[in-house]
Amino acid sequence: MNQAYTVPFLRAFRQAPWRTQTQAVAAWAIILLIVAVLGGLYLSVASRAATAGRDLQNLELRKAALLQGNDELRAELARLRSTTYLYDRARALGFYPAQDDQIEYLSVNNYPSAVLAPPPPVAAAPTQMAALGSWFVETLNHWLTGQSRSGR
Amino acid sequence: MIETVFVRLRFVLMGLAILAGLVVFQLVRIDFTSRTVEEMRRLSDAITQRPRTFQPERGRIYDRSGEMLATNTVQYELGLSLSFIVNEDEVVETLADLLDQPESELRQRLHDAEVHNAQAQSEQEKIRYLLLARPVSGEIGNQIKALRESGQKRLSGVDLTPIPLRFYPSGALAAQILGFVADSYEGQVGYFGVEGFYNEYLAGRAVQGTQRDVPLEVEPDPIPDQGADLYLTLDRDIQYLVEVSLADAINTYGPSGGTIIVMDPKTGAILGMSSWPTFDPNNYGQNLPSDPANPAVSGQYEPGSTFKILTMAAALDSRTVTPETPFLDSGVAEVGGVFIRNWDGGAWGPVDMNGCLQHSLNVCLASIATWMGPTTFYNYLTAFGIGHPTSVDLSAETAGLLKRPGDPDWYDSDLGTNAFGQGVAVTPLQLITAVSAVANDGEMMVPHMLYRLQDGLAVHTTEPQVLGRPIKPETARTLSAMLARSLEAGEGDQALVPGYRIAGKTGTAQIPVPGGYDPTQAIASFIGWGPVDDPQFIVLVKLDRPATSIWGSETAAPVFASLVKRLVVLMEIPPDAVRATLTSQ
């Protein structure tokens, strides 16, 4: 009995025009929602990328400005340390070059001479090649004769 | 009624759907039709990005102890973007004040531009950018920036474009060694000196990149290969001493020019080098000499009596003579049909080789050359590097001139004249390099200016190289002793430095002119080294056409002495007696 009433009711429910419309609206709403979410995500990512890009541009500009500032400071420092400037300042302060009879020489062990201390060493490349060659000969000799390199 | 509304609404919706469909279709067409995509991308790129060359920073130059000799700074191009000017009065007043120009002049230029734009037939003809000044100092540029950033002045429309500037903090110091840098279409290019010779290393390598204006596509700027930093063998204080000494010599003796070189004979390292006239590389355009090449490496001259050192070295080394070999000076010698006389025209009678050097006898040295014969003599001169570049790392080096037997312009008489430095041309650096063999136990080192090259983290150090061994060590020591003795007893005693034993030789060289030699003017020079028992320096002084006296013994020799008195202090070389005491302790 109940089943006889239920079937027509369900059919009627399914075929109700408002229900079909609701389904269509819901489907479109979901699509719209998905599109909105995707759009939102895209906008969010794009805006973040744009912000990062703008930050990067600003940082590059700042970097260029700082490098330029460093160059200017370095140049000014070099000017203030230049020989001409220092000699003029020294003279203005009452200094003058030491005369022969005012110089006293003292013996200081390992004291590096201002000019002559750092002469670069004479090229050692041929010596290195010779050392490598002798090492090879020595190793080969030990291997052939079976002798230990560390001795007996 | 309601149904009608619904029907119409459906039509509207359908219309909108079709419209949306068209939009989607168009989007798909643009996105997936390759030709359109490429065209659009090209158009987009043209609007939003442009190619840009990222220029490297030029390497800096330091002396051997790290004192800066050349660096980079910035100056600006100052211009106006006319369409962006908001407050013309404020812009004009501010810029006129900073540029030290009359306001009326700036206003007139703006007015002229406006008139031009009003009469322009097309947009292309219009003036959009008005160049006001180039270059403008970094100081003025920074003032404009500060005013704009602080908001004190409304300077919209004022454009400052940075221009890289090579800056030499010591001004004219070492100008001929450093050279200078000029702008070219390739960017900054070094000319002459170290800037020219090492331009490839100093300049670095530019990279091509893209300047993107759309922030979505921004990438970090590409980093170009920065120029390498150079550390020179030059000592800034010695260089200053050399330049001051040369300037004093110019004032005292009135020569038209001159050169001083200080070198370490043991390594070939150039410690100081200067020539007059010089220039300020910061303003090379205003005061550049007609030939900006360094006369120390490119200026050839007949060396005169300083060349006798090489002749005597060859004679001693070939065992043609010994220091005690006697010579009877009759005051004239005939070589190849040419009569050679002494500097004073006199005859000095019986002397030995010490006497020949002491009195700088042309007749004696010419005779010695004939005793050696041309083959031996010229082989030695070639071994000393005469007629060949020294391979110094400075731009525009010349080779000098040495005629040899067999050359079409060589005559028998050249053997005699070459022996005392006539008819042969050398550069100052060539001569000091050759004579350094005598100071350095017969070993001649390659003269060099580069001490160290630093390219990022990579460091390349220059190692001293032997250029040649023209004479034996014992010959060098014998000749050094002879020259020291001759200096102590001869005409060059004004070159002596109290407390230090010095070896050296004066020179007074006639100047060749068409048809012979200048009868009134000469090149005065002195070349010497010390301390004789352990030479730490070799110095060449050359004065062109001194006005007060033509003799090297009266002009160049005192300059040498005065310079060396200060040089030994700077190089911390104690007097011989003190050094002997300190060594024995």
Image (cartoon, coloured by chain):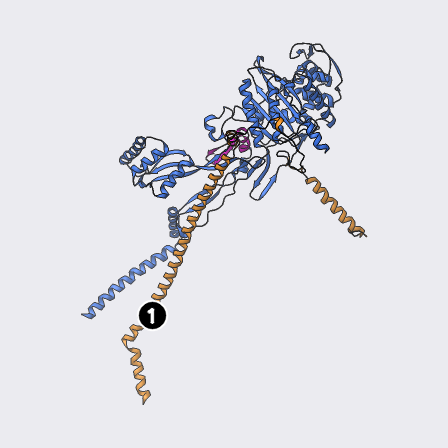
Chain colours: A orange, B blue
Residue B17: quadrant of the picture: bottom left
Residue span colored magenta: B171-196
Chain label for disc 1? A
Residue at 54% across / 20% down in the picture?
Answer: B250
Residue A116: quadrant of the picture: top right
- Which residue is outermost to the left? B1
Instruction: Name the spot of residue B286 as percent of width and height, x first.
Output: 45, 27
Left or right of B91 on screen, residue A57? right
Which residue is under mark 1?
Answer: A27
Say what secondary structure mark 1 lies in.
helix
Residue A3: quadrant of the picture: bottom left
Image quarter hosting the N terminus of chain B: bottom left
Left or right of B453 on screen, residue B370? right
The three-letter amino acid code for the residue at tag 1 is: Ala
Please say whether residue B142 is visible from this viewpoint.
yes
Q: Nearer the viewer, residue A45 or B1?
A: A45
